[in-house]
Amino acid sequence: MSKEGVKLKSMKDVLILIKSTQQANDDDEAATYEPEIIEIITKGKFEKKEMGYSLTYEEMGEDFKYLTTLSFDVKSDGQKIATIMKKGGLNTMLVIEEGKRTNCWHGTNYGNLQIGVLGELIRSEPGENGGDLELCYKIDVNSIFTSNNRVEVNFKYYDVEE
């Protein structure tokens, strides 16, 4: 505890491995595209919070003109809620709540796009040496299904040499 009686937050350096799979559908539901898979490994921060935890890392924006901060905020108080936030040149916020549809927004070069996010699965397993996070959700635009999404995150704590 600090002098003011406030519990200090636990911030740790982490190595983050992310595998993101998106499978989009055409307007014709019979036409399904091949899944798009993106995998990255990066350094970031793990922060223990009162009601859960946050994983944060930085990446270059899509046009390499700006730095983007991306974070996963996960509730671990029995609620099945995770938030993916992207802050930089274009901002996005997806709220994933298992078993519920939420209205969210995604920044584009032409303005914000309102999208629906239907949370299917949130599996969060933080531990002593790191942890795993899995998010499965569907996205719709104007109530028209556009994609199935799965994000698998593995993170490991490490000490930064001074």
Image (cartoon, grey):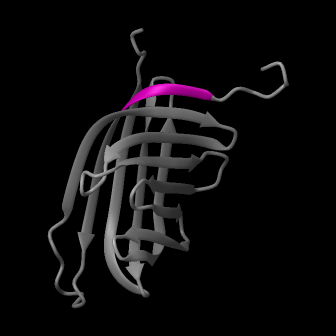
Q: Residue at x 48, y 55 (%)?
A: 85
Query: In the rendered view of the protein, which quadrant contains the N terminus?
Result: top right
Comparing 77 with 144, the one in front is 144
Query: How far across and how far down the image is residue 74, in percent?
Result: 55, 48
Q: Residue at x 48, y 40 (%)?
A: 55
**For the magenta stretch, what is the residue range?**
10-15
Q: Residue 84: x percent and y percent?
A: 47, 55
Instruction: Find the residue positioned furthest to the top.
Output: 162
Horizontal side, residue 50 vs residue 160: left or right = right
The residue positioned farthest toward the bottom in the image shown:
28
Q: Quadrant of residue 113?
A: bottom left
Please state which of residues 29 and 54 is positioned toward the viewer in this rendering.
54
Indicate whether residue 145 is drawn in magenta.
no
Residue 12 drawn in magenta: yes
> Residue 28 sits in which quadrant?
bottom left
Q: Is residue 137 left or right of residue 8?
A: left
Relative to 36, residue 110 above or below: below
Looking at the image, is 87 positioned above or below residue 126?
Answer: below
Tell me which secondary structure the magenta stretch mostly adopts.
strand
Query: How many numbered marks have been drawn onto this rendered protein structure?
Result: 0
Residue 61, x across and y down, in percent: 30, 53
Residue at the outermost front position: 65
Nearest the eye: 10 or 122: 10
Q: Residue at x 25, y 74 (%)?
A: 24
Q: Is residue 8 above or below residue 39?
A: above
Quadrant into which the C terminus falls: top left
Question: Going 42% across and 87% down the picture, which residue do you hit?
Answer: 142
Q: Is residue 114 above or below residue 52?
A: below
Q: Is residue 98 left or right of residue 156?
A: right
